[in-house]
Image (cartoon, helix red, strand yellow):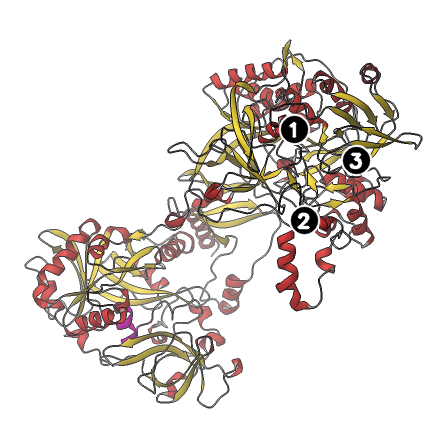
Amino acid sequence: MRIRCPHCGERALDEFTYLGDASITRPDPASPDAASEFYTYAYERRNIAGPTQELWYHQAGCHSWLVVTRDTRTHEISDVKLAEDVASKRIKTTAGAA
Amino acid sequence: MSGDQSFRLSKHGLVDRSRPFRFSFDGVEHDGYAGDTLASALLANGIHLVGRSFKYHRPRGILTSGSEDPNALVELRTGARREPNTKATTIELYDGLEAKSQNRFPSLRLDLMAVNGFLSPVFSAGFYYKTFMWPAAFWEKLYEPMIRRAAGLGSAAMEGDPDTYDKANAFCDVLVVGSGAAGLMAALAAARSGARVVLADESFTLGGRLLAENRSIDGKSSAEWAKTAVAELSALPNVRLLSRTTVFGAYDGGTFGAVERVSDHMIQPAAGQPRQRLWRIVAKQVVVAQGATERPIVFGNNDRPGVMLASAARTYINRYGVAPGRTAVVFTSNDDGASTINDLASAGITVAALVDTRSALPEAIEARAEALGARIFEGGVVSDALGRSRVTGARIIDASGAVHTISCDLIVVSGGFSPNMQMTTHLGGRSQWRDDIAGFVPGTLPKNMSAAGAANGSFSLASCLADGARAGSSAASGAGFDAKPIAVPSSDDEPSSVAAFWHVDRAKHKAFVDFQNDVTAADVALAEREGYRSVEHLKRYTTLGMATDQGRTSGVNGLAILAKLTGKSIPETGITTARPPYTPVSLGALAGEHRGKHFKPFRLTPSHNWAKAQGAVFVEAGLWLRSLYFPKPFENDPLTSIIREVNGVRNGVGFCDVSTLGKVEVHGTDAGKFLDRVYINMMSTLPVGKARYGAMLREDGIMMDDGTAARFAEDRYFVTTTTVNAIKVVQHLELCKQWHWPDLDVQIVPSTDQWAQYSVAGPRARELISRIVDKPFDVSNEAFPYMAVAELTALGGLKARLYRLSFSGELAYEIAVPARHGELLARTLMEKGADLGVTPYGTEALGVMRIEKGHVGGPEINGTTTAGDVGLGKMASKKKDFIGRTLSERSGLADPNRPRIVGFRPVDRAARLRAGAHFVNRDAEPTAANDQGYLTSVAYSPSNGHWVGLGFLANAESRMGEIVRAYDPVRGGDTLVEVVSPVFVDSEGARLRV
């Protein structure tokens, strides 16, 4: 498998480290349901056959965290974004909604 | 037997008769030529019997001329370079080659284990599951060793491999796998468009079956045409030709694995050359042009030496100039096989009979057979081969059912072809059945992959050339090149009709489907009777297709027989999934340079060379090699050295290289806020010029790591991690910064490698450190108290950092200088501390002192313990959120009854403690139900004069002074220990602050 890092270009799989699901975000610790929300966040995962968003780390490269869109059936990677950009956008959206 | 190449043809073949080679087989010397394989050279010398089969030890010969051969496995080379299970059909002959037959005792001709053939009812399908079941104890001691000795293939060299293996990467636009008619045309079409092309072929000469057939292209012989095409390709700068290279697997993202046999055709590799090279080829497009594998027909004794596939017979005649026999019976179901009579006749081999399962042969072939004086059996079958270690005749049943016996020494057989489309299914592609060619062809293909030629089910030469040209152009276009169609050369045409035919059910003798695993048609029938009716079950129950040849000659025959038994069609029955590798790949090639010390290279500390000169004993710690202790010449016992080092520190001054601790710069206006969120305690309140101990949790509330944070400026922190977690913690901090809180102004830069850092500890540490730092820096307790930090210069102007931190419990400093000056610092500490009796100490003494002081380390922060468990619960701030806080408050993790860290000492002070022992109450049975916790770290404490330990004990706080059992059945330990404070030295911490 090869991942196109936005900073370093297309690189071989062995440069990257996998973490997990990028569709979930760390819950608000001040939420009244924080305990159960954190439980879900830490342990409960969907097992999707199809495109998934995953967090990968360019360990042997620029140390960027990436949001990789990968189809678990074909391992085809359709999109790679910097996690920082995705997260900044998420925060702006959340702030705008509030 | 003949040793004089009496079966070598005078006019045929591409071997180089000007380069004769001498080789030996089972100790007997023979001659061959450059350009031979071991198989062709053996056949040239009249040798067909080359091995014994896996289970029944039946005599076996050379069935094929390629990498699909199930029989002709030999041990190649001797001594440390001996390699078992190599295929004689692919071994390129060289002068001095030595090979031995396998799986025979005492000799190939007289094999005592052949008695297994008479015991065959015992060895039928599923015999592992049925036989030798009772008594159970006999299995391990008797049955299994016996079976393992009787069955099996060659034996590996017992010495280390003296050769090296290389790894390389290649990138191209179009990868073409296979260099036959289709592959060469595909490579030409792609290369002429300007695409970067890699063309790989498993043989030592490019050309595939063009070298093996007596055909013409553009008025030249097919072999000549191949040579011209290869010459054009090799002249192009955008083409890389890889002969002797098997592309063995397709992987995600256009990545392919290939192994190049760089030196397997030499006695030993040339200087500086590897034996094999593993290629990782990344291609935008790939054309699979790996040809097709001919199928044998399943008839009685079809495994006898002298039974050979038609395509192989033609290869030996046309490519190697060898007659595989004198008198042949040809048994086929198709035009391609039947036309082999032409090649046989051209080599002067008598065609005694042409037996074709079809009721009518094409007229041209029939006329030719008649002209050759062959007896023709249309609609007939060969039911059995006659002879034992060599074919002596064929038993033929004609269309009317009459039986004929015809003498021959060669039975040429063809049941049609199976396209080599394994690589198209490696990524989950599906194959589909084509009735017209009686074979599976690629169906759904992975992205950016196409198949061409025989691999794609196009069997005639003209269609292979055209299909290759098409595939090459379209692959180049797919890779973004403007590829124009190229002219397809003209070739003679041939009939290529096939009738599906698998199995002669009127055979009198054992009829083999899988030669390598000795699976017969009867085994398939037995499996079906016993309910193993899916191909996947059939495969596992009978082991059909599970040998090193991956069932390339047997798979389709096996499932066709099963389909007939179950009354289903072949496509309904389906085919088992092909997985990489296409042919076996040696572990040496996969390991490459990563073996021995290169498997896990050490990182060396800045003081390494100095420590080595001091005679230090080293230990692996994470990625590093660290000094364990520094024995003096008269110290023979490690404990003596370690006790001396501990005493040296506690009574004077010592130093230890702690550069391996992870070091991270955390800068930015939000650095304090950021660290508050990753540590359980507050870091934003840390004054500039101070350090603080800190602990980090995982989000699930379990301890991740501990270390210190130092603040050099409002926006500039420096944090340390444990040696083993250095990389993991940086990854975690980056995740927090980039993913959780991208709005914080903070930057993270690991700097472990930038600093050489030494701990200088002991009551006289201040004296020593004052001689290291540059004036006028004041190291007095007032100016630089416990937990102070500073940036300064040392050793006469070197940039340095000084921390007043203590792991040992003594007055201590950590001093850091740029890594390249680390050795200088070690030498200077020795020199300037000489009059203080300075003691360099290693990780053993470091560990002893931390246990004496009750500091937790790796054995305590072990992935199952909370901050509370390791005694850091009170450090957690209640005023803020931090990673792991919410889940650490779960009742199970916050339970006050959880085992907590506490100290232990043996009641009998002379007794030794062992880490890993479990605690039970003094009078309780040592059972899992009575488990009270376990000992994690132990050391002989020089300061106390007895062993001390740290461990986790349930309700520890209320049990001070209690006596419990430390039970260690594995090592026979059962010691009474007293529960005490985990701090065994200076419990008030007075020494730190002087």
Q: Nearer the viewer, residue A24 or B868?
A: B868
Q: Which mark is residue B46?
A: 1
Instruction: Tell which subunit mark 1 falls on.
Output: B
Instruction: Tell which subunit mark 3 falls on.
Output: B
**Of pointers 3 and 1, the one earlier in the residue sequence:** 1
What secondary structure is marked by label 2? helix
- State the separation of the CA atoms marked 3 and 1: 18 Å
Evaluate whether residue B721 shows in this view.
yes
Give the percent coordinates (x, y) of residue B757. Answer: 22, 58
Is B849 inside the magenta-drawn segment?
A: yes
Evaluate whether residue B772 shows in this view.
no
Q: Magenta segment range?
A: B846-856
Q: Quadrant of residue B189?
A: top right
Identified by mark 3, the residue type is Leu
| Secondary structure predominantly adopted by residues drawn in magenta | helix
* Residue lying at the far right of the rendered structure: B400
Crowd around label 3: few <14 · some 14–19 · many ≥20 (10 Å):
many
Q: Nearer the viewer, residue B541 or B707?
A: B541
Identified by mark 1, the residue type is Gly
Q: Nearer the viewer, residue A49 or B604?
A: B604
Q: Which mark is residue B112?
A: 2
* Placement of the C terminus of chain B among the 4 image quadrants: bottom left
Residue placed under numbered mark 3 in the picture: B386
* In the rendered image, the vertical position of residue B112 relative to residue B811, given as above or below: above
Identified by mark 2, the residue type is Leu
- Mark in front: 2 vs 3: 2
* In the rendered image, the vertical position of residue B537 relative to residue B373, given as above or below: below
